[in-house]
Amino acid sequence: MIASLSLDLDNKWSYMKTHGDAGWESFPSYLDVCVPRVLGFLRERNLKITFFIVGQDAALDQNREALGQIPVDGHEIGNHSYRHEPWLHLYSKEELVDEFARTEDALEAATGNRPKGFRGPGYSLSPTVLEVLADRGYEYDCSTLPTYIAPLARAYYFFKSPEMSDEEREKRRKLFGKFADGFQSLKPYRWKIDERKITEIPVTTFPVMKSPIHASYVIYLSTFSKLAARTYWNSAMAACRATGTEPSLLLHPLDFLSAADAPELKFFPGMNVALEKKLEFVGELLEGYQKNFDVVTMKEHADAATERDLGERTWKD
């Protein structure tokens, strides 16, 4: 069985913006620290993954050197929006076209690659986003997160953001999705947009339970009990194999950073874990991932899925 691996390269400013913190407008960055660290980590394990990059970061000269090394190491480049606003469902079609065009141009200038895949910030997706993806020739999307706990995650997020205005809260009203998303399939399918089709690769959650299994969540569990976190992870991998689910595992920059690297983000779960211990634990997770599956990029996963007879879906609110 194959499995894909990707990293949403959310920068320091994008976390601060989503959290409603002041100072994000100057685009503070940790990419010069994070990207080389991640690339070295992947190189040691002979892993090729997909990096979903924010267009605003690719447009800034200060990030060009770090981002330019990603394709040199053989990794795929994906679109993670330009402004990293998890409310793309509120955008008009004209605004989305501008968002995508600016991101594609910035990514090509920084990395030499134009993306074929997209993941919305905060798993933000809408019929209009899918239409624009189809118009622009995207081959796959991976913005769906089939989980029942989205409302709980959103409530926790708002609890940790007490200074956020009512207007900003309204924009984030659908952040992480809704309870009904837990009923979505974990297996690839095709979105049908008019007569066009786009392959969807969901972010994998624990089969049946539909609780998250992305690395940040398992790291958070490890702060209570490493044994429980390992058991949970191993059980999730076994459940994927038992149900024929080819997993798509999601990484984040904070999986490779500690509070010492980004003090502004110390409130995020798992940021109090010492860097050496965190990297050791993530390495352990990925070692098990590689033992259980043939790990590929998102595009390779989508290409393999597209060769099969996938079910088709149209958008239903």
Image (tube, rainbow, N blue to C red):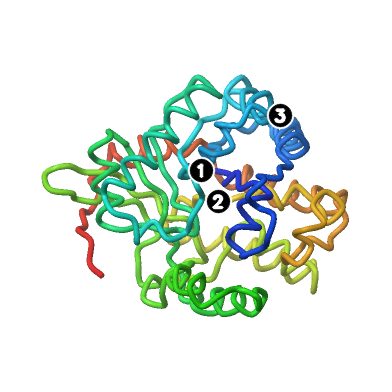
Mark 3 or 2, nearer chain start = 3
- Quarter of the image with the C terminus is bottom left
Which residue is disc 1 drawn over? 4
Local SS, label 1: strand
Local SS, label 3: helix
At x 49%, y 78%, the residue is 151
Mark 3 or 1, nearer chain start = 1
Give the vertical position of 69 relative to 309 (above or below): above
At x 45%, y 74%, the residue is 170
Q: Residues within 10 Å of mark 3 (few under 14, many from 20)?
A: few
Q: CA distance from mark 1 to mark 2?
A: 6 Å
Quick one: 3 or 162, which is closer to the camera? 162
**Residue 116's spot in the image, x, y percent?**
38, 33
Local SS, label 2: strand
Which residue is disc 2 drawn over? 249
Place residue 21 in its image quadrant.
bottom right
Give the vertical position of 206 relative to 130 (above or below): below
Q: Are marks 3 and 1 in contact (CB under 8 Å)?
A: no
